[in-house]
């Protein structure tokens, strides 16, 4: 990334010199006004280009496990995998696992850069900021699972490990995360070590519909907005059932269509199609289909509740997307700028544009109430708890 940084810095330096010369020719009153506005914009842009914390800088956005020269090609193939007819989703469901791997190679750096290390939504708690609300949403999980020190807990679709680190820290349990994407394994392992959580975490690359774990080996399991990527929910739920010990609990925050969704309403279908495409989902299931999938593989249904509407005082999960809308456009301008300079892989601008556009559909899904990313479903594997 260093040569790219040097090129960008030189280009920006040249632009700055030109701007200064033009600025000096303006009347004094205009200089004051423009200086104030420019100062604010400069701080915002600098924060976006070189963000604080351990996450990628704009110069360093990559295609993850995808070679730089192949990013545009892979994104084009990803886009073509979705049908053009309403409600189609991924046409060839046998390619779902591969497409999800491609999707997360394309978006992981952008997610970390623009959102954070926890790739999920949460309700906004009164008096708490978004990061605190996010942590509370995660910390609920080990309490419900009954996770304790010495337990081994499975994170099904762990991403770069944001929730894993919260849950391991809160519970003292050893959390094993599985993700289909090798780049995410690298990022999660890096963050776990840097934040001092490595002794309580393990990250494995694997397909969560065919997990490399022994049967009856985990004391509990959870999934945070991840199993929605499975070709069929029964495939991943069945594997979770297999690896859990008898009596153990499985909690999932599931992306689902709510009872307000009308499959005959064209606008509802459009919203769901765009959410699927922009998030790597093969299709959108209903809350009832998710519950039934768990029972079909042998689980007992303990609890099912839409966390998005369970509290009358919590703010909507999609408000965070709304408050960041202006930042999305600024970020896209920055990504486009570095795309023009060829400092980011060709195709990264298009990937970011997809994510900006799907944010609008997610907001629409939340505002209409037809979609929730947090149908909390708690299952129990029958048998005496070990």
Image: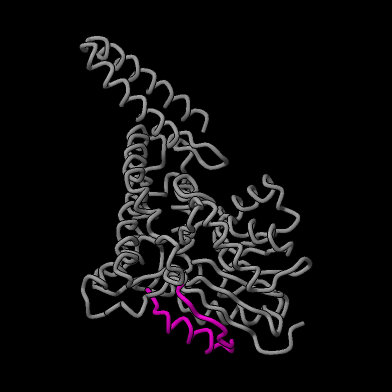
Return the residue nearer the eye: 182 or 321: 321
In terms of image quadrants, where is residue 94?
bottom left
> What span is in magenta?
284-306
Establish if 31 lies above or below 86: above
Measured along the vertical axis of the image, is residue 278 above or below residue 333?
A: below
Figure coloring: one colour
Q: Position of residue 184 (x, y in %)?
A: 56, 54
**Residue 385: horizontal and vertical position, in percent?**
74, 84
Residue 4 vertical placement versus 192 (above, below): above
Quarter of the image holding residue 382? bottom right
Nearest the viewer among 196 and 71 is 196
Rendered residue at 37%/75% (across/down)? 257
Residue 314: image location, x then y, percent: 45, 62
> In this picture, is 207 found above or below 241?
above
Q: Is residue 299 magenta?
A: yes
| Residue drawn where x is 39% and y is 79% of the image | 286
Is residue 293 in the magenta section?
yes
Q: Is residue 27 left or right of residue 275?
A: left
Picture quadrant of residue 39: top left
């Amino acid at each position: 990334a260093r040569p790219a940084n040097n090129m960008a810095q030189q280009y920006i330096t040249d632009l700055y010199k030109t701007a200064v010369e033009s600025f000096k020719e303006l009347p004094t009153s205009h200089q004051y006004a423009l200086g104030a506005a420019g100062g604010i914009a400069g701080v915002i842009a600098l924060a976006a280009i070189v963000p604080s914390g351990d996450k990628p800088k704009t110069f360093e956005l990559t295609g993850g496990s995808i070679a730089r020269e192949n990013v545009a090609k892979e994104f084009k193939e990803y886009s073509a995998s979705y049908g053009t007819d309403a409600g189609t989703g991924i046409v060839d469901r046998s390619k779902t696992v591969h497409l999800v791997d491609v999707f997360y190679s394309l978006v992981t750096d952008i997610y970390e850069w623009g959102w954070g290390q926890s790739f999920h939504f949460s309700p906004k708690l009164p008096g708490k900021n978004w990061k605190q609300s996010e942590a509370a949403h995660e910390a609920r999980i080990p309490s419900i699972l009954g996770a304790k020190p010495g337990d081994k807990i499975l994170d099904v679709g762990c991403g770069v490990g944001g929730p894993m680190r919260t849950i391991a820290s809160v519970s003292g349990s050893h959390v094993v995360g599985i993700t289909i994407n090798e780049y995410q394994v690298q990022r999660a392992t890096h963050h776990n070590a840097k934040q001092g959580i490595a002794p309580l975490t393990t990250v494995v690359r694997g397909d969560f519909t065919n997990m490399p774990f022994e049967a009856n080996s985990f004391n509990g399991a959870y999934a945070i907005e991840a199993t929605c990527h499975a070709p069929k929910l029964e495939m991943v739920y069945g594997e979770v059932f297999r690896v859990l010990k008898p009596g153990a609990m499985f909690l999932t925050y599931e992306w689902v269509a709510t009872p307000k969704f009308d499959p005959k309403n064209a606008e509802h279908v459009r919203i769901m199609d765009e959410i699927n495409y922009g998030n790597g989902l093969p299709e959108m299931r209903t809350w009832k289909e998710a519950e039934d999938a768990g029972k079909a593989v042998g689980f007992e249904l303990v609890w099912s509740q839409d966390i998005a509407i369970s509290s009358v005082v919590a703010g909507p999960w999609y408000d965070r997307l709304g408050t960041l809308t202006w930042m999305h456009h600024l970020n896209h301008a920055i990504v486009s700028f570095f795309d023009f300079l060829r400092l980011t892989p060709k195709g990264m601008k298009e990937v970011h544009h997809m994510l900006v556009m799907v944010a609008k559909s997610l907001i629409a899904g939340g505002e209409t109430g037809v979609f929730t990313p947090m149908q909390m479903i708690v299952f129990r594997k029958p048998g005496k708890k070990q």
